[in-house]
């Protein structure tokens, strides 16, 4: 396993900005309001030819009554337990506070190596004498850094590097399936991640928008290796006036782009809402393998027809993705959650399927013999041949004599023939029409 560096500290000392500076990408939501980073955020970094993971935590507010701040503290504690080394960030502008002392006590108790970073030391070549008071924390030499300008980050990483265990050969896992869990707020995305991981990895609270960022969790079981990406709930555009919310929708879109498989969560009590169709549409347009997961099934009053009715409703409202399998689960009770992994593996394989040109053209000959291609004003569509040019999603190109004659309905007919023959369940299919003259053919 790669070493894990956790960045901790009280709210608003610049942890997220430092995190972004160290990993060189704008991953963490940076805004000057306490408690913006609510969840642990992971990124991979490299220093001195050594790869390691870095985690940004919500600010620790010692002895807080506020529910979200208490959650953030719990999150930070989990990060501390799993860390190889901890970067404790303090702020030179506010100086040493009682809260800093409390956090330092908690870190000392953990027994983990701690590197003390004093942020907002923005002037170069001039050491602010206030830095010396941080020796009182008993955590060794404070390292001056500026998250805004990047000064001191090299010294900081050097100090962390000293605590890394000897490097073993770390093989790259190509067989890890990246799974994005998407849906509108409050459908139970975080509860599902927690059920799978068996630990309180993501903040679960019935306040909408508790998970503001996409959070990655690695997970392995007898079915395979997975990276679960829990995304912030995407809410209606009209409600996205908060700049932090806007960034979360962007983050969810990025999470979909990064994933191999998308689990589209729908609340069984509400059925498919307009917002669900938008969220599912993002995954469909991105060409991702999809599974429609109807959650909170335990909370629905059922008879022997309820599941069929719900399935029909989902199929009707998400009519553009008839290929996606539907699974009814309860993240709360764990009902049918283990079935998810078989489905994830299955749709992931389907999305990566390659079909030989020979097999496609046999199918094409049969399909055009069964249903004649359309004609217009005496000119008939001729489909010369078909070939696969890509996977994830499977992408086919049809060469024909006149692209204008290739009606959408005939394209859909061919797509259905491909699906009926080769399966391709759970994945969109792309069909591109190319025109070439009879002389070329």
Image (cartoon, rainbow, N blue to C red):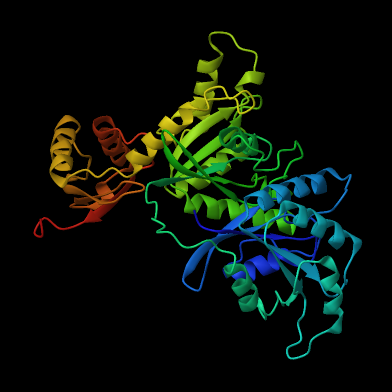
Residue at screen point 61% across, 77% down:
154
x and y, in percent, of residue 269 in the image: 66, 24
Q: Quadrant of residue 23?
A: bottom right
x and y, in percent, of residue 2 in the image: 51, 57
Instruction: Name the quarter where the C terminus is drawn.
Output: bottom left
Horizontal side, residue 205 vs residue 102: left or right: left
Image height check: is 140 above or below 245?
Answer: below
Horizontal side, residue 241 vs residue 262: left or right: right
x and y, in percent, of residue 404 in the image: 28, 51
Q: 149 or 164, which is in the foreground? A: 164
Image height check: is 158 above or below 184?
Answer: below
Horizontal side, residue 176 vs residue 328: left or right: left
Determine if residue 414 is in view: yes
x and y, in percent, of residue 437 in the image: 15, 58
Residue at screen point 81% across, 61% down:
33
Q: 90 or 34, which is in the foreground? A: 90
Q: 74 or 181, which is in the foreground? A: 74
Q: Residue furthest bottom?
A: 125
> How many numbered dots are placed on residues in this image?
0
Q: 303 or 165, which is in the foreground? A: 165
Determine if residue 38 is in view: no
Residue at screen point 77% across, 73% down:
118
Image height check: is 302 above or below 174?
Answer: above
Image height check: is 235 above or below 245?
Answer: above
Q: Quadrant of residue 189?
A: top right
């Amino acid at each position: 396993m790669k070493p894990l560096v956790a960045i901790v500290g009280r709210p608003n000392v610049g942890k997220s900005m430092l995190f972004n500076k160290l990993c060189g990408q704008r991953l963490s939501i940076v805004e000057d309001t306490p408690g913006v980073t609510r969840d642990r955020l992971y990124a991979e970094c490299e220093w001195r030819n050594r790869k390691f993971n870095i985690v940004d935590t919500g600010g620790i507010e010692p002895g807080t009554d506020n529910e979200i701040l208490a959650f953030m503290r719990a999150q930070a504690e989990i990060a501390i337990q799993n860390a190889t080394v901890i970067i404790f960030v303090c702020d030179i502008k506010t100086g040493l506070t009682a809260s800093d002392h409390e956090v330092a006590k908690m870190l000392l108790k953990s027994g983990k190596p701690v590197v003390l970073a004093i942020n907002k030391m923005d002037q170069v070549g001039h050491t602010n004498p206030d830095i010396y008071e941080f020796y009182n924390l008993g955590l060794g030499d404070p390292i001056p850094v500026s998250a805004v300008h990047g000064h001191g980050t090299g010294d900081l990483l050097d100090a962390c590097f000293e605590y890394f265990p000897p490097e073993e050969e770390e093989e790259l896992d190509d067989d890890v399936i990246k799974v994005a869990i998407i849906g509108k707020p409050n459908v139970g995305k975080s509860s599902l991640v927690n059920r799978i991981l068996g630990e309180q990895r993501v903040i679960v609270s019935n306040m909408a928008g508790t998970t503001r960022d996409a959070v990655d969790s690695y997970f392995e079981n007898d079915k395979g290796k997975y990276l679960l990406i829990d995304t912030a709930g995407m809410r209606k555009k009209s409600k996205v006036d908060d700049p932090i919310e806007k960034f979360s929708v962007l983050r969810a879109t990025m999470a979909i782009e990064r994933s191999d498989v998308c689990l589209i969560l729908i609340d069984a009590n509400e059925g498919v809402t307009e917002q669900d169709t938008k969220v599912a549409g993002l995954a469909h347009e991105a060409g991702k393998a999809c599974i429609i997961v109807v959650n909170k099934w335990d909370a629905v009053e059922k008879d022997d027809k309820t599941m069929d009715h719900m399935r029909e409703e989902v199929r009707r409202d998400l009519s553009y993705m008839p290929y996606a399998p539907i699974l009814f689960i309860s993240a709360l009770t764990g009902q049918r959650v283990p079935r998810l992994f078989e489905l994830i593996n299955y749709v992931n394989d389907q999305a990566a399927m390659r079909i030989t040109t020979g097999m496609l053209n046999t199918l094409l000959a049969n399909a055009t013999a069964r249903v004649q291609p359309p004609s217009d004003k005496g000119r008939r569509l001729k489909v010369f041949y078909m070939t696969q040019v890509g996977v994830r999603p499977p992408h086919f190109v049809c060469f024909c004599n006149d692209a204008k004659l290739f009606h959408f309905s005939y394209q859909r007919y061919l797509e259905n023939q491909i699906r009926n023959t080769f399966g391709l369940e759970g994945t969109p299919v792309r069909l591109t029409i190319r025109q070439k003259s009879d002389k070329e053919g």
